[in-house]
Image (cartoon, rainbow, N blue to C red):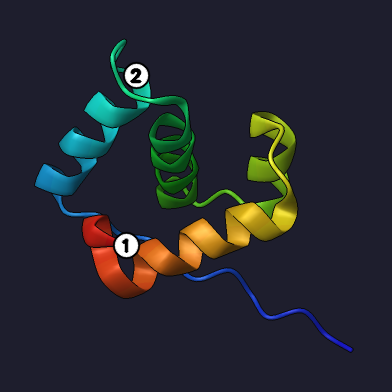
Amino acid sequence: MSVAPARAIAPTPAERERLKRMAYGPKTEHRLRMRAQVVLHAARGRSNARIARETGLHLDTVRTWRNRFAALGLTG
């Protein structure tokens, strides 16, 4: 059984700035900070497995958040 490739992430410049503020802002709650970091890593072309290793999150969590952003953008 083969694994589907990770979905490409291409945030707009405005989305990227908002994600950076969320990922590194001191007042952002932890879960939103981690989601923003996952999306920023994905936008750099990193694999889900690498993102999971670097963030300490489960692979399924990374895959879910990546797919949600690809489908819905920041609202996801």
Which quadrant is the N terminus positioned in? bottom right
Q: Which residue is mark 1?
A: 76
Numbered tag placed on residue 41 in the rendering: none
Point out the tag, 2 or 1, that comes first from the N-terminus: 2
Q: Which amino acid, by three-letter code, is at mark 2?
A: Tyr
Q: Position of residue 55 (x, y in %)?
A: 64, 32
| Corner quadrant of residue 47 | bottom right
Q: Position of residue 54 (x, y in %)?
A: 68, 31
Q: Which residue is mark 2?
A: 24
Q: Position of residue 70 (x, y in %)?
A: 37, 68
Q: Pointer 1: residues within 10 angstroms few (<14), some, or many (20+)?
A: few
How far is the residue under mark 2 from the one under mark 1? 19 Å
User: Taking 3 as reference, is 11 above or below it?
Assistant: above
Q: Which amino acid, by three-letter code, is at mark 1?
A: Gly
Secondary structure state at the residue bearing disc 2: helix
Front residue of this view, candidates 76 and 52: 76
